[in-house]
Image: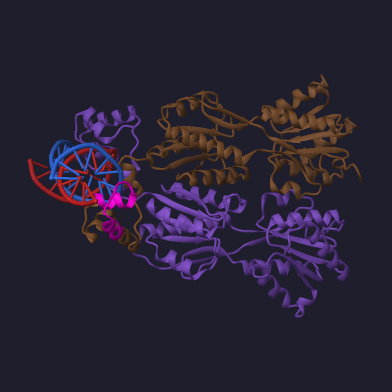
Chain colours: A purple, B brown, C red, D blue
Amino acid sequence: MITMTEIAKLTGVSQPTVSRVLNGNQAVNPEVRERVVACAKEHGYQPNVMAQSLAGSRTHLIGVILTDISNAFFADLVKYIEQEAGERGYRLILFNTGYDTDHEQECLEIVQRYRVDGLVVVPAQAQSRRWKEQLHSLPIPAVVITRRAEGLDCVYVDHREAGAQVGRHLQEQGCESYVFFGTMADEKFEGFAEEIKKHIPNFQKYFKNITTKEPAAIEGELRQHLEKYPGRVGIFAYNDRRALQLLGILQKMEVEVPGRAALVGFDNTYMCEYLYPSLSSVSQPNEAMAVKAVKLLLHKIEQPEDLHVEDWPMRARLIPRSSSVLASGV
Amino acid sequence: MITMTEIAKLTGVSQPTVSRVLNGNQAVNPEVRERVVACAKEHGYQPNVMAQSLAGSRTHLIGVILTDISNAFFADLVKYIEQEAGERGYRLILFNTGYDTDHEQECLEIVQRYRVDGLVVVPAQAQSRRWKEQLHSLPIPAVVITRRAEGLDCVYVDHREAGAQVGRHLQEQGCESYVFFGTMADEKFEGFAEEIKKHIPNFQKYFKNITTKEPAAIEGELRQHLEKYPGRVGIFAYNDRRALQLLGILQKMEVEVPGRAALVGFDNTYMCEYLYPSLSSVSQPNEAMAVKAVKLLLHKIEQPEDLHVEDWPMRARLIPRSSSVLASGV
DNA sequence: TTGTATGCGTTATCAT
DNA sequence: ATGATAACGCATACAA
């Protein structure tokens, strides 16, 4: 790979002149410019970013550290992050922690070695104080995406509000009892429960939480719930994957969806609209989140003096489909 | 971020000595070592990879250029590539071409600027000669993954053989007519057709190809085919996404699956086993492919004198499920 | 065992 | 308009 110095020799000028030509910075003799450009083109010159970075400029690298790239939701985020960053001349160096906090630590060290200009992080450990302090003390601007992290720049959806949307929807659909599939420590459950409690103060009485992922156990729990409550049951799953699993089980049990059970998922994966019945789900603004995170980060990179911390909750949106809405006409 | 030179000053030794200590290369006075290590630790020293690379060693960067990271299959590959490369001390710089060949060109330039040690590529343009020559002439070792590319190192599944497996399976399940959903230029279709022709020479007569993705059109085509052929129809979709869409349409049409129509997808996405009926699908050896590709690449990086070109076809495996297999017992 | 000197490919600051 | 020169952070050959 040819260097500026080599081009300089070939064209009989000095290396700094080559630099000036190739960067179009200052005025140079048109003849010289032509010669140099031609030579660079002929040999397929490509600047050495390592050298550029060393010489004082940025690396134009953004470290992306996330929990699980094989999760469609995060993969989608990465796509938009890459796109937005790429348009502004930044590249991604990617790390997958696999929810392993030790490995996350390593990643945090490695990105420093590469002198990345900034960081986009989906933290493995949600809220550990130690972790937040560490990220804060890093000499690299960072934006947390997907989760709220107090005191740090972050872009995320308001899960509580999203859960409330689901609660409202299922009530409007005439549900008389409820099931939440996932951990109750989840903010979307909290919002969900709060919303329903507004109308049904003794919510607990009509509610069941299921945490197991084991099909037979799920079926048992559901059967039990259905026997106890004859009315329509509203089921909220913490993601589409689980919702799909539930849908399969309900179909196997020959429970009518949405007649007997109304089902809502989360993430609005592509499969939602293809399923039969199509699956109601909560759509997160993936692209908007990614774009916002990158813009925030680049701002912090390019205006390091601005220490303002940004906290960006965004709204999710429930997409009602056949799994929770009774067909009106037919 | 502290540098070796600074540590040298703080500990009263020379910079090369610090280098020796921190790299554990040569023998150094234990006392000095201790002092230097302590100082480095205290200030959180992290080597500057840019400088290391410039000074002659490798960048330890692997460029990953692929068509669509938001595709679950590729995202999964990336996960394994990151893992395997990471264990060997290499990091990923990621590019998403979005199937845009112009953008793919840019990516090829940019990775050169970062002086990546190697490249893993999912090409946007399958087989253009120009592209292959270009990749070959690149001063960077590269491995093509997912697609066969003659003359280049590549790791991929034999789609023809995979298609044959599906053909064999659907025949064994007693199908009397066939539908392929996707483009007939696809190797998996070729293998599929060849296999069936072994037993049914006038295959064309019992076959329909559907390429549209528009639900109403698909439904029309299917209805037409079903009216024409009373026997069981075997449907092969080029990926699970399409298979899912088909399944939804079949359910809506109240066509019995697998009784009237046996359905097989491709990619063996997680949802296959959750669907009802669960979806038969072809499983690609994602992890094995990723690991093989990385190993191949690292070999080429570390043994540049070995110019042997490796062509690694791998076997896919059909996972039969309820969508194509009639329940025997019940 | 340790220090000096040099070079990697740039950018940037000087002179000229 | 252009050429010396230094500097970025590190590795390495060489000298001591």
Q: Residue B19: within the magenta?
A: yes
Which residues fall within the magenta stretch?
B16-36
Q: Quadrant location of residue B265? A: top right
Does any portion of residue A213 appear in the rendered image? yes
Front in this rendered view, residue A208 or B244: A208
User: Looking at the rendering, in which quadrant would you find the N terminus of chain B?
Assistant: bottom left
* Residue farthest toward the bottom in the current orientation of the protein: A201
Measured from the top left, where is residue A171 in percent x and y?
Answer: 77, 70
Which of the two residues, B5 or A179, is positioned nearer the viewer here? B5
* Percent position of residue B311, x then y: 56, 27
Decide if residue A73 is on the left or right side of residue B48. right
**In the displayed structure, would residue B267 be above or below residue B135?**
below
**Horizontal side, residue C6 vs residue A209: left or right:** left
Residue A15's place in the image compared with A63, above or below, is above
* Picture residue at 71% right of the left edge, 59% below the top: A265
Residue pictured at 50% horizontal, 55% vertical = A65
- Residue A120: say if magenta: no
